Amino acid sequence: MIHESIYVLDFGSQYSHLIVRRIRELGVHAELVPFNTPLKKLSACRGIILSGGPQSVTGQGALLVDRAVFALGIPILGVCYGLQLIAYLNGGKVSTSQKKEYGPTRIRISKKTGIFKGLKIDQLTWMSHGDKVTKLPKGYKTLASSNNCRYAAIANYQKRIFGLQFHPEVSNTTNGQKMIANFIKLTGVKHIWTTGKFINNKIDEIKKIVGKDQVVCALSGGVDSSVAATIVHKAIGSQLTCIYVDTGLMRHGESEQVIKTFRKYQRINLKVIKAKAQFLRKLKGVTDPEKKRKIIGELFIRIFENEAKKIGKIKWLVQGTLYTDVITSGISVGKTAAVIKSHHNVGGLPKKFGFKLIEPWRDLYKDEVRKVGRLLKLPTEVTARQPFPGPGLAVRIIGEVTEKKLAIVRSADWIVREEIEKSGLHKNIQQYFAVLPTIKSVGVQGDNRTYGYPIIIRAVTTKDFMTADWAKIPHDLMAKISVRITNEVREVNRVLYDITSKPPGTVEWE
C-alpha cells in the first residue's frame, strides 16, 4: 500500500524540519524520519528527500543511506549533503572545495525542466557547503551551476532523482518553494494534508489510546500546552485534569489569564499551585543558565508529581512538546543535532512518573499549533501568545534570580510589550521582550546621581525561530519605550537594544 506522504531523511541539519514544513504548506503530508529508516518503510511513500547535514560524505563515520534506496523507483531529491550523497553512492566523486560557498549565491540554470520548470535562468539561492561534487555519476546531468560550483543542481531523469547543492527550504532561496512544489508534483502524491483533518484524526487517536484512563496535563499557559490541553479535553472530557504550577517566574498578568481561560471559557478541571517561594529558594545564588533551567525543571517535576498523586491513578501525561523543542535539545530523529539548550518538556518525565506520554504536537511547528488553536476556538490571548521559555523570566535575568529582579524585568517587559502592541508592530514582530543583565552603571535622574541596571530590549522577526533577524523598530517608538522604562522602573537608568541576528546569537539571552 502506498502512503500519500513524503519522507524526509534526516542527516543532522538544523534545517531538516523546514523541508517538512514547506511540504505541508503545499497541502502534502510529510514526515521527518531517521537517515537509516528501513527500505520497507521507505518503499511505501510517494517521494524521498535527503536532507542536508554537517558531515562530509567521504569522512569517517559519515551518515550514509542504503544504496538500494536509489533502486526503489521512487522520486528522490537530495539537498546539499543529500546531493553529495547521491553522487558519492552512485559512482561520482565528492571533494573538498578550495572556495567554500556560504550565504546568498547566484546560480544559472541550464535546463528549465523538472525541478526548475517555470523558473528564470538566473536564481538567487542559499549555499552552505565546504565539499562539492567534482565528477557526476553515470546517467546524471547538470541542471545548474554557480561561479564556484559546477554541479549546483543535478538530475537523473530516467530514475527521477534530483540534487540541489543549495537549500530550497530556506526563505533566502528566492524560488525555493516553487522548486519543492515542482518536485512534489513529480511524485504524484495527493494533496490531502489539512489542519482540520489533523484535528479530527488526533481526537480519534487520543480517544482510542486513552480509553477510560485518567490523564493529567502540565499546563504552562503557553500556546503549545494550552492547545494540547484543549484537544485532549475535546477527546476525553472530564478524564483530563490540568495542573498549573505558578512558579512566580511568569510575565505580567499571565497566571490570571491561564485561570480565566481554562476555568471560565474551557471549563477544564484545573488545579493551580502557588510555588513562587519554593522556586526562589532553590534559585538563590545560582547564576549559570543551564543550572537555572535544570533546577526549575526538577522542582517543577517534583511539585507536579506530588499534585498528580493526589488525583489518583494517572496513566497518561499530556505535554505540549514541539518538533523544534526536540531538535534544539539534540533529540533529533537522526540523533545528530547539537544541544543548544535544555527544554523543560523534552525527555525524562515518563521515567520519573511511570506515565505514558500524549504529545499531540511532537511533529508540528509553532505556526501549525496556533492554527489548530484557532480552529478549536481558543481566545486570541492564547493563540497569538508569544513564545515564552519554560523557565520563564528566570532566563531573562542574567545571573541570580531574586524577587526584586523579577519585579524589575516584569515591569520593563510589560512596557515593551504594551508599547509595541499599541503601535501595531506586534503583527510583524514575532517576539519582543526585556532582559535584565547583572551590571550597573552611573546615571543622572532629577539632578541626582544614580547607579542602576540597564534593560536590554530584544525583538526579532522570523518565520520559524530557527533563524531570526533583529526587528527594525522605529526610533521614535524606541525612544518612547526608553523614556517609560527609565521613568516607571525606578532601578533602571539605561535602555539598550540588541541588534544581533540568529545565528550568531540565540533569540533568548540564556
Image (cartoon, rainbow, N blue to C red):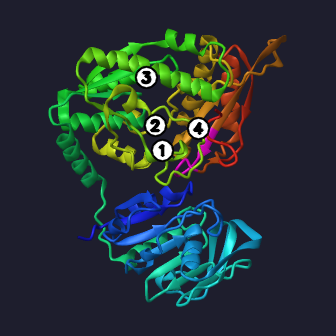
Residue placed most toward the observer, 324 or 332? 332
Distance from disc 3 to disc 1, alpha carbons, whole Å, reads 19 Å
**Residue 403 colored magenta?**
no
Answer left or right for 304 relative to 398: left
Label 2 vs 1, first from the N-terminus? 1
Residue placed most toward the observer, 171 or 245? 245
Label 3 vs 1, first from the N-terminus? 3
Label 3 vs 4, first from the N-terminus? 3
Label 1 vs 4, first from the N-terminus? 1
In the picture of the structure, the residue carrying the numbered disc 3 is 301
Distance from disc 4 to disc 2, alpha carbons, whole Å, reads 11 Å
Where does the C terminus fall, quadrant-wise? Answer: top right
Placement of 388 over or under 14, stated as above or below: above
Instruction: Identify the secondary structure beneath mark 2.
Output: loop
What is the quadrant of residue 197 in the picture? bottom left
Residue type at numbered disc 1: Val
Answer left or right for 474 relative to 223: right
In magenta, the rendered stretch is: 459-466
Dot 3: few (<14), some (14–19), or many (≥20) neighbours within 10 Å? some
SS majority, magenta? loop
Dot 1: few (<14), some (14–19), or many (≥20) neighbours within 10 Å? many
Residue 260: x percent and y percent? 33, 22
Kindly identify which numbered label has been placed on residue 326.
1
Instruction: Identify the secondary structure beneath mark 4.
Output: loop
Residue type at numbered disc 2: Val
Distance from disc 3 to disc 4, alpha carbons, whole Å, reads 18 Å
Distance from disc 2 to disc 1, alpha carbons, whole Å, reads 7 Å
- Is there a contact, CB below 8 Å, between mark 3 and mark 4? no
